[in-house]
Every structure is written in C-alpha cells, then in structure tokens.
Image (tube, grey):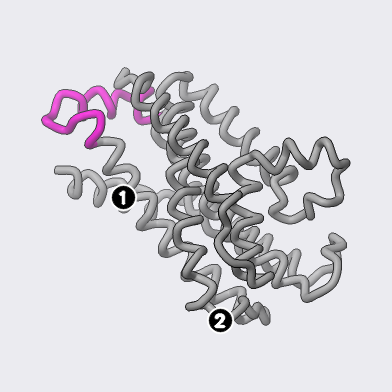
Amino acid sequence: MVLAQAGAEIRATLRNGEQLLLTMIIPILLLAGFSAAPLVDVGGGRRVDFVAPGILALAVMSTAFTGQAIATGFERRYGVLRRLGATPLSRTGLMLAKTVAVVAVEALQVVVIIVVALALGWSPHGGPLLGSLWAVPLLLLGTAAFSGLGLLMAGTLRAEATLAGANLVYLVLLGLGGVLFPLDRFPGGVRQVLELLPISALTSGLRGVLSDGGGFPGGPLLVLLCWAVAALALAARTFRWE
C-alpha cells in the first residue's frame, strides 16, 4: 500500500504544472542564467562549477520542502488526508510513501540538472562518479531534513499559511543559504549562523566534494543529521490528518 501511494504521489507531482515549475524549471533557469552571466562574484574558477552544486541543493529543497509542504497542506484542506486516514495506510506509511515519491522525483531532477550543467561546461572534481560518492549521503540527509520540515509545516498550519510560509522560506533560504551567493560575502558573525541552516550545509557540502575535491564532509553531514532527526521527530508527533 505504501508503494501504491508513492506511485500516486509521483504521478500527481509530474502532472502538476506548478510543481514542475518550482522543482524543475526554476532551478534550470537559475543554473543557466547565473552560469552564463557575471551577476555574482564567485571568486576564482569557472562560474558553473560554483553554481551547479548550489542548484542541486536548491532542487532538493524545492521538492522535499516547498513542493511537498504546499501539496500536503492542500491535501489536508480538501479532505484527501482524512480519506486516506480511513484506509489501512498508517501515518508512518503515508510519510514513507511521500518520502519515496520525493526521492524518485529528486532522482529525475538530479539527472536533468547534471546533464544541463555538463552541457554548460561543468567539470565536477574527479568526474560525476567519484564526486557522487559523498554527494549521495548529503542528498539523502538533505532530503530527510527538508522533508521533515515540509511535513511539520503542512501538518500544523492551515493550507493558505503553508503556501505563504513555504514560499517565503524558499526565497529566504535561496538568498541566504549560499546557493547563488557565497557565504563569505556576509559578516563573520552572520555567516556562522547561516552555516547552520540545512540549505547552507547541503550547498557547502556538495560544493566541497564536487567542486573543491574535499574529503568526508563531516560538518555538513552532522548539521543535516541534526535537522533531519529533529524535524522528522516533530513532524511525526504533530502531523494531523485533518
């Protein structure tokens, strides 16, 4: 039943034009635009090598947090979750199905973004396969953290408040999370706080292993693990069917 629900979630996402705009088209437009135009000083190196890891992190946030929070919020508003609650599908099963659907959509996103980035001249450190060794746990923990935050918001706020809040958080984290603008441009005290955000940890971790050739990204993984555990635990305790 979990797999059947996950399949329904995937089909609903791919058929939703607004969801595709948020999860696929906007990240690709940002990747192409900021890679081609000198809009931001990223220091030495090629622009696309800096932008591509940030766009991968943005894609995770778009799908696991913003898209999922809005969709789940309106499912609760229109009684879809109440009807699901009357089936043998448990609350844990519903969250698992949504997580499986998010991971499947993200896999498609990652492939498309990597293909576009490579076409723009992206050259990940050691090639796509070597760089992915540490990128995979970063992406999975980032997905868990953002998925927990999305379900926490959708499970506690009204649908309209979830829509507004999720879009606001998306824009704030896009600007302050190191996705397009280097965090070292911020004052030292502010930067230390921003580095604790899940999007900052995911972006810096991916940039470290894919662009800088760094080793085990222990700091970013620890930050994402803390966010994932806290957000999923709170979502599991507070999520309401109605």
Q: Is residue 188 above or below residue 158?
A: below
- Residue 81: image quadrant is top left
Q: Depth-wise, is mark 2 or mark 1 nearer the camera?
A: 2
Q: Is residue 180 above or below residue 96?
A: below
**Quadrant of the frame with the C terminus:** top left
Viewed as shown, does residue 214 lie left or right of 40? left
Q: Residue at x 66, y 70 (%)?
A: 211
Which residue is denoted by mark 1 in the rendering? 100
Residue range highlighted in magenta: 74-93
Residue type of the residue flagged with mark 1: Val
Q: Position of residue 201 (x, y in %)?
A: 62, 48
Toward the viewer: 119 or 231? 231
Relative horizontal placement of residue 188, taking residue 127 as reference (left or right): right
For disc 2, the marked residue is 127
Where is 69 relative to 61, above or below? above
Q: Amino acid at mark 2?
A: Gly
